[in-house]
Image (tube, helix red, strand yellow):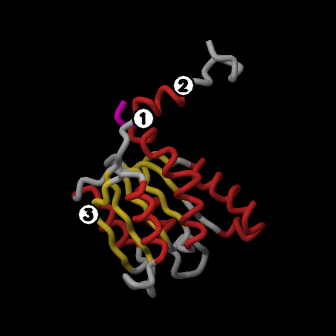
Amino acid sequence: MPHDHPHGHGDVPHQHKARAPAHAKVYVITCSDSRTTESDEGGRIIRAQLADAGHAIAGSVILPDEPSRIAEELQRAREAGAQVALITGGTGITSRDSTFEAVSAAIARPLPGFGELFRMLSFAEIGSAAMLSRAVAGVSKEGLIVFAMPGSPAAVRLACERLILPELGHLLEELGR
């Protein structure tokens, strides 16, 4: 029995990851009133990282940061067969930032650790301004895994490289149990 955990469970995450699907079907949503296909660097980074990891892109869209539009797009993601929706933008505190509210309303099972860890890692990079981020994640009633991260390219890289991509297969394996 491994001794790296006081209760002998140190190997459980590795066992789960070993059974996890290698590839996910992911829908990418950029929430912005100003980004275009040419200027959507966050969306481009997400798609490139997904492709590099061998994941399939089920769809990709840029839409205004409006809760009803976000809710509709999450439904479209499910209809497109996506298992995961990655959202960039709209997680700040301005009056136009409503991604947090839209995603929170869609989530049946929150994953608070994502926002907590994102802000912790972000704090190490940008300091106390990290507390202004309302990055959020969870699983919708329909079983769609949703991650909402800030729109800045640095935030997208941080969220994808350090948190989302390392656990994507594990999340799918857990949901499939």
Residue 71 percent coordinates (x, y): 35, 66
Say if 111 sits above or below 14 in the image: below
Q: Which mark sits nearer the N-terminus, 1 or 2?
A: 2
Return the residue nearer the eye: 128 or 37: 37
Q: Residue furthest right?
A: 128
Q: Marks 3 and 1, how far apart in space?
A: 23 Å
Q: Mark on residue 12?
A: 2
Say which of 175 and 51 sits in front. 51
Where residue 77 sits, quadrant-wise, is bottom left
3 or 1: tag closer to the N-terminus: 3
Q: CA distance from mark 1 to mark 2?
A: 12 Å
Q: Which residue is mark 3?
A: 76
Residue 126 forms part of the magenta stretch: no
* Residue type at numbered disc 3: Arg
Q: Amino acid at mark 1?
A: Glu
Q: Which residues are magenta?
A: 173-177
Q: Are marks 1 and 2 in contact (CB under 8 Å)?
A: no
| Magenta region, main secondary structure | helix
Given this view, does label 2 or label 3 mark the residue nearer the observer?
2
How many C-alpha atoms fall within 10 Å of the one at disc 2: few (<14), some, or many (≥20)?
A: few
Residue at the (62%, 12%) spot, across then down:
1
Asked whether, in this view, residue 123 is left or right of residue 85, the answer is right
The percent coordinates of residue 3 (x first, y second) are 69, 17
Q: Nearer the viewer, mark 1 or mark 2?
A: 2
Crowd around label 3: few <14 · some 14–19 · many ≥20 (10 Å): some
Q: Could you say which disc has been placed on residue 174 in the image?
A: 1
Residue 52, how many percent across, how many down?
41, 57
Amino acid carrying label 2: it is Val
| Residue at the image position 68 percent from the left and 57 percent from the top | 121
